């Protein structure tokens, strides 16, 4: 069973975590539109009635899954950026932590594009907040690194603007639904480019 988690995850009820993991597998196999509550219940080894005791409907499950994935990504990125790495190495590790197993699973699913289109599942607000949180983590790291003299932000704009550019570049790597190996290679190239540009 695919686990919707990164290197470290936020606290969540074990039963809910199991349901979300099962739901992720089902969404990945069948797509959002074709998935029914019965499919998720079977994957979670529970009755549909029992599933409804935890979640109201498929939208509720997807929104909870999206929130969990963004929380997990933020936790993992924060852990990486708290370590003492050279800029390019730190960004490469943070980008990898941000995507984790989730992006790998989505890019290998025939329904990946549908699932990554958060507007389809009424979770655009969760995606917006989650991406803003991640952008803030990168901005804080840039600020700390600049204050320590490890990087320079000359001609780069504010830390927040640069962090937003990083996030936009990562999003761009997903366009066209590349295979995961190509996506990872692109992440590494981006990390090296930003790392070199930030070198004092």
Image (cartoon, helix red, strand yellow):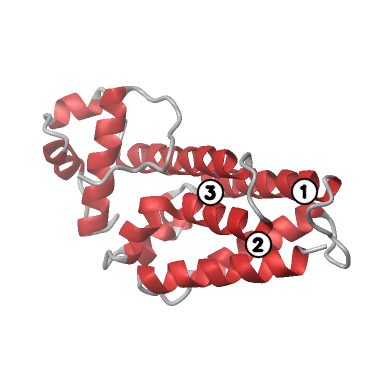
Cα distance between the residues tagged 2 and 3: 16 Å
- Identity of the residue drawn at 67% across and 57% down: 87
Q: Do residues under tags 2 and 1 come within 8 Å of each other at their CB atoms?
A: no
* Numbered disc 3: secondary structure: helix
Q: Position of residue 95 (x, y in %)?
A: 54, 56
Question: In x, y percent, where is residue 119?
Answer: 48, 56
What element does badge 1 sit on?
helix
**Residue ID at (75%, 60%):** 162
**Disc 1 target residue:** 145
Q: CA distance from mark 2 to mark 1?
A: 16 Å
**Callout 3: 10 Å neighbours few (<14), some, many (20+)?**
many
Give the CA distance from mark 1 to mark 3. Answer: 27 Å
Figure check: 189 above or below 161: below
Looking at marks 2 and 1 on the same chain, the residue that comes earlier in the sequence is marked by: 1
* Image spot of residue 116 (x, y percent): 42, 59
Q: Are marks 1 and 3 in contact (CB under 8 Å)?
A: no
**Which residue is identified by label 3?**
127
96 relative to 154 in the view: left or right: left
Q: Please state if 74 lies on the left or on the right of 180 as rendered.
A: right
Identify the image quadrant of residue 88. Answer: bottom right
Query: Residue 98: x percent and y percent?
Result: 50, 51
Nearest to N terminus: mark 1 or mark 3? 3
Question: Based on the displayed image, in which of its 4 quarters is residue 45 positioned?
Answer: top left
Q: Quadrant of residue 130?
A: top right
Quarter of the figure with the N terminus: top left
Which residue is under mark 2? 166
- Judged left or right of residue 176, residue 13 is left
Mark 2 or mark 3: whose residue is earlier in sequence: 3
Q: Nearer the viewer, residue 84 or 39?
A: 84
Identify the secondary structure beneath mark 2.
helix
Is the residue under label 3 in contact with that under label 2 (CB below 8 Å)? no
């Amino acid at each position: 069973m695919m686990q919707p988690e990164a290197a470290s995850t936020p606290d969540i009820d074990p039963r809910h975590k199991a349901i979300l993991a099962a739901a992720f597998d089902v969404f990945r196999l069948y797509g959002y539109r074709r998935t029914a509550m019965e499919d998720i219940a079977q994957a979670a080894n529970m009755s549909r009635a029992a599933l409804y005791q935890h979640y109201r409907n498929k939208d509720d499950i997807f929104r909870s899954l999206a929130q969990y994935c963004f929380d997990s990504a933020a936790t993992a990125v924060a852990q990486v950026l708290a370590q003492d790495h050279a800029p390019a190495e730190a960004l490469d590790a943070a980008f990898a932590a941000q995507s984790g197993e989730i992006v790998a699973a989505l890019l290998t699913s025939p329904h990946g594009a549908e699932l990554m289109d958060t507007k389809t599942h009424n979770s655009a607000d969760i995606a917006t907040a989650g991406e803003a949180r991640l952008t803030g983590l990168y901005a804080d790291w840039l600020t700390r690194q600049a204050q320590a003299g490890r990087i320079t932000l000359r001609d780069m704009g504010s830390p927040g603007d640069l962090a937003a550019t990083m996030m936009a570049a990562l999003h761009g790597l997903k366009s066209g639904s590349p295979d995961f190996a190509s996506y990872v290679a692109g992440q590494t190239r981006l990390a090296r480019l930003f790392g070199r540009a930030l070198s004092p």
